[in-house]
């Protein structure tokens, strides 16, 4: 008898061969007969009013495309609608797009773009956290009472910097006119975000806009909402010029003008009773939204919900603001507000423990969440929580306690830090049922080949493989009998964006249901189609206005341990080792999950100590791979990762979310390790040699 | 414009283009060889790496004129070799490919390393790949892939 393999057992990824061999057609590899090139003309000032535009002599066949060419609305439709397709009168950040220059010779296009002269009336830009664009609040229990009866209160502030996604493939689209409509092929995470935004800007019906995903050379959130901006610009150009256009960013342009992780400032205040238990907490969170709100309100919301991380605190008062500044708009980046908050709370819990003279490990464990506890928003942690076992395992494989003790000797300049954390899977609150309403489709042709029709994007994280594996496994057919092509909105239903660690749990979950239906009803040699739509688990109750209830249907969990050595001379940090343990329900492919674990941690740890980006009067000081440093092969530590089985009843085979979980705990783990190595409290990341020197010099 | 003759993937070729044109643009735009990728355009990421007389070079920093008379190997030529097959298999088996945009360059860098050092240590692998950025994998599975290739392809390098 054939025994079926465990679903977690790894298979060869189905798209590796075309990528290794260089055959995979990424957006910039695509050529269309007679295509033109486009370049953006941008504002050189942070804030002002456009007074006059003087174009250079435009040779025949060269065009300008600006706000006056927009057929319908000059807004990029995303969750919040304030981001213009092209600046019309006002400019609000350095690099804001004003027009495109389009034409046949790339170099001529570049030269023309450089020679557009624009006069501005400059206005005073805003860079501080004074102009709130979004304000959110929620509470739990009775925080006033908690602070009234507190034996003591402790307060700290935490700060995080920018982080740039630094996908290796810059943003880009190729667009052409097809049957009187607009077809856009691009490097994107969310085909339907792009499609809906373009329909809105162009005032076109659904059948006139077609969006196709090309292989995506990295995204990490950076290709969530931003491509909607360039897609709308490109569609306007296509309408005006009626010729195919290639619109690819160069690295500097990409880094200077696209969305990044929000810099943040968080104030935390805890009330402790006479037994040193935290009985209440007040938090005030500020995110730098940049010039337009875009997705920032949603980022803020996810951040705020993570305010207590994996700790139970009964009385809470949480305020958050997105502050508008005259800088590049910030947006989605793997973790989506949670990395800032998990850094703040993990450091805060340690700092409280240190201030009251208690072992942080013991103090933290005492406050750790248990199954049945209330979440920060008064929902319930319903599913089994195995964090205790995970911490135990992390402690064993890293030899945490012995090292933590040995490194108390400051002369070693070594440190070890441990973070533990959760990440909510899928959209926040009722987003999946009210906003996204995901649909998936399975089609079986008359040769019994099964085609997966969903809008989920493989940007490296593996759904091209894992979805086929999942469906084939349920149908009990060879994986070769199941296809999953790059999504094309002409054929695939809107299964929602490829974000929020929802792809396997939500879209995969729907596919699993569709496959079960198809299997039950399988008619050999006949065409069959099965469609499934998302249904909210009936236990989930969420009130968006008060931010109260179950913010997520399920949570994934993680433990990160990081070991560092700090140079006594230069204060440079070497990350020597990293260990991690994850509970993501059930791995649909263990090696693919391990790949997420390695890569997510590399990004998360680097966020804490290595990746520096800042601006001076609105001008980013880092604009390419030479001055924005991401980890190279010699920077990454030796990593050891483990995954635990803790199947979630409503996920496919028990799977929950993975992608973001692996990033969110890296920064506090490395910051805590550095804190130990230098014997100073770290309250700001990245913990660069300069900031370490300041901490040491200032005692 | 000037005529430049060189060997490309085993065959002699002459192109007539400006001498200072970036060799990456010659490959991608003039010859249609899009396996070499542009990640940064400033020699930092290695996605455009090719072999010139066996040496790893970032083609985005290379003017056309400097390849005159030289032997150029890109991923399109290399993928026809036995060594490539070993590396391809190792990259797939170890899960070393995520988004894939860095991978052709990473493979060229691995070939360059194994050609000079058929049995590299992990430290040597790390140093050899330090000019090729990968944002997805954290490199761990790439190190394993190169080790696996060195073992499986013993005698080929």
Image (tube, rainbow, N blue to C red):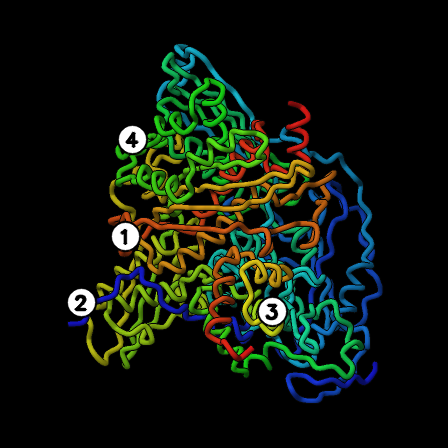
Of pointers 1 and 2, the one earlier in the residue sequence: 2
Judged from the image, the secondary structure of the residue bearing numbered disc 3 is: helix
Q: Secondary structure at mark 4?
A: loop
Q: Are marks 3 and 4 in contact (CB under 8 Å)?
A: no
Distance between mark 3 and mark 4 Cα atoms: 54 Å
Q: Chain of mark 3?
A: B
Please provide percent x and percent y for residue A44: 77, 48
Q: Residue at x 65, y 87 (%)?
A: B10
Q: What residue is disc 3 on? A: B113
Whether residue A400 appears in this view of the structure is yes
List the residue tagged with mark 4.
A373
Q: Residue at x 84, y 65 (%)?
A: A57
In 3D space, how far apart are the residues under numbered discs 1 and 3 (Cα atoms)? 42 Å
Q: Which mark is residue A654?
A: 1
Expressed as whole percent of the image width and height from the top left, the position of residue A25 reads: 55, 73
Inspect this view and state whether residue A133 appears.
no
Task: Tell me the quarter of the image containing the C terminus of chain A.
Answer: top right
Which is more toward the observer, A626 or A500?
A626
Label 1 marks which chain's residue?
A: A
Q: Quadrant of the N terminus of chain A?
A: bottom left
Is residue A450 toward the left or the right of residue A146 in the image? Answer: left
**Left or right of A172, for residue B41:** right
Q: Nearer the viewer, mark 3 or mark 2?
A: 3
Q: Which picture quadrant has residue A553?
A: top left
Q: Chain of mark 2?
A: A
The quarter holding residue A482 reads: bottom left
**Mark 1–mark 2 distance (CA, rounded to whole Å):** 21 Å
10 Å crowding of disc 3: few (<14), some (14-19), many (20+)? many
The reply, left or right, for residue A274 in relation to residue A134 is: left
Mark 1: few/some/many CA within 10 Å (<14, 14-19, 20+): some
Q: CA distance from mark 1 to mark 4?
A: 22 Å
Q: Please tell me which of labels 4 and 2 falls first in the chain.
A: 4
């Amino acid at each position: 008898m054939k025994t079926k393999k465990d679903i977690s057992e790894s298979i060869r990824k189905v798209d590796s061969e075309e990528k290794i061999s260089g055959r995979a057609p990424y957006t910039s590899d695509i050529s269309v007969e007679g295509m033109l090139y486009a370049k953006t003309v941008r504002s050189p000032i942070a804030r002002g009013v456009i007074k006059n535009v003087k174009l250079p002599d435009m040779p025949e066949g060269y065009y300008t495309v600006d706000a006056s060419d927009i057929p319908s609305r000059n807004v990029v439709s995303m969750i919040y609608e304030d981001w213009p397709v092209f600046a019309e009168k006002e400019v609000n950040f350095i690099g804001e797009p004003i027009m495109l220059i389009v034409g046949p010779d790339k170099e001529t296009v570049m030269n023309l773009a450089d020679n557009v002269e624009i006069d501005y009336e400059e206005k005073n830009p805003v860079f501080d956290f004074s102009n709130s664009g979004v304000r959110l609040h929620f509470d739990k229990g009775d925080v006033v009472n908690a602070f009234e009866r507190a034996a003591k209160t402790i307060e700290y502030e935490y700060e995080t910097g920018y982080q740039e996604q630094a996908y290796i493939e810059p943003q880009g689209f190729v667009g052409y006119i097809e049957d009187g409509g607009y077809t856009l092929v691009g490097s994107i995470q969310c085909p339907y975000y792009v499609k809906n935004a373009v329909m809105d800007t162009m005032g076109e019906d659904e059948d006139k806009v077609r969006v196709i995903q090309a292989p995506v050379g990295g995204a990490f959130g950076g290709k969530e909402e931003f491509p909607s901006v360039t897609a709308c610009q490109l569609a306007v150009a296509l309408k005006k010029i009626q010729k195919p256009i290639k619109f690819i960013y160069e690295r500097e342009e990409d880094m200077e003008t696209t969305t990044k992780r929000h810099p943040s400032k968080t104030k935390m205040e805890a009330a402790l009773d006479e037994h040193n238990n935290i009985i209440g907490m007040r938090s005030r969170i500020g995110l730098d939204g940049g010039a337009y709100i875009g997705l920032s309100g949603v980022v803020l919301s996810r951040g705020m919900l993570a305010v207590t991380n994996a700790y139970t605190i009964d009385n809470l008062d949480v305020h958050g603001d997105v502050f508008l500044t005259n800088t590049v708009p910030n947006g989605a980046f793997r973790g989506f507000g949670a990395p800032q908050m998990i850094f703040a709370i993990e450091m805060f819990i340690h700092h409280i423990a240190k201030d009251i003279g208690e072992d942080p490990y013991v103090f933290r464990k005492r406050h750790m969440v248990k199954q049945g506890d209330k979440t920060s928003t008064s929902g319930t942690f319903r599913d089994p929580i195995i964090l205790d076992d995970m911490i135990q395992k992390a402690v064993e494989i890293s030899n945490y306690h012995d090292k933590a003790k040995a490194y108390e000797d400051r002369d070693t300049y070594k440190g070890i830090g441990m973070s533990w954390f959760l990440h909510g899977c899928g959209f926040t609150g009722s987003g999946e049922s009210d906003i996204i309403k995901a649909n998936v489709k399975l089609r079986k042709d008359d040769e019994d080949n099964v085609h997966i029709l969903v809008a989920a994007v493989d940007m490296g994280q593996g759904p091209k493989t894992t979805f086929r594996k999942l469906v084939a496994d349920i149908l009990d057919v060879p994986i070769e009998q199941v296809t999953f092509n790059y999504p094309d909105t002409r054929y695939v239903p809107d299964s929602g964006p490829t974000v929020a660690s929802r792809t396997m749990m939500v879209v995969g979950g729907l596919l699993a249901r569709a496959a079960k239906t198809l299997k039950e009803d399988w008619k050999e040699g006949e065409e069959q189609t099965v469609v499934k739509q998302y249904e909210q688990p009936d236990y989930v109750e969420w009130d968006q206005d008060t931010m109260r209830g179950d913010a997520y249907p399920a949570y994934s969990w993680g433990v990160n341990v990081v070991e560092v050595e700090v140079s006594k001379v230069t204060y440079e940090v070497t990350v020597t080792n990293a260990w991690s343990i994850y509970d993501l329900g059930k791995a649909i492919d263990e090696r693919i999950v391990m790949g997420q674990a390695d890569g997510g941690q590399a990004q998360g740890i680097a966020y804490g100590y290595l990746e520096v980006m800042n601006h001076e009067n609105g001008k980013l000081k880092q604009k390419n791979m030479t001055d924005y440093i991401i980890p190279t092969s010699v920077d990454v530590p030796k990593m050891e990762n483990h995954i635990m089985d803790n199947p979630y009843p409503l996920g496919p085979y028990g799977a929950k979310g993975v992608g973001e979980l692996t990033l969110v705990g890296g920064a506090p783990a490395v910051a805590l390790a550095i804190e130990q190595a230098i014997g100073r409290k770290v309250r700001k990341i990245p913990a660069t040699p300069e900031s370490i020197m300041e901490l040491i010099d200032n005692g | 414009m000037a005529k430049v003759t060189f060997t490309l993937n085993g065959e002699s070729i002459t192109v007539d283009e400006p001498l200072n044109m970036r060799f990456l643009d010659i490959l991608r735009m003039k010859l249609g060889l899009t396996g070499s990728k542009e990640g940064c355009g400033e020699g930092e990421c290695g996605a455009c790496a090719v072999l010139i007389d066996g040496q790893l070079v970032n083609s985005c920093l290379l003017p056309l004129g400097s390849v005159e008379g030289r032997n150029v190997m890109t991923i399109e030529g290399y993928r026809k070799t036995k060594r490539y097959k070993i590396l391809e298999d190792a990259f797939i088996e170890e899960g070393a490919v995520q988004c894939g945009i860095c991978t052709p360059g990473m493979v060229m860098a691995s070939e360059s390393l194994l050609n000079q050092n058929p049995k590299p240590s992990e430290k040597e692998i790390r140093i050899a790949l330090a000019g090729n950025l990968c944002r997805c994998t954290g490199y761990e599975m790439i190190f394993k892939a190169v080790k696996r290739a060195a073992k499986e392809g013993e005698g080929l390098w």
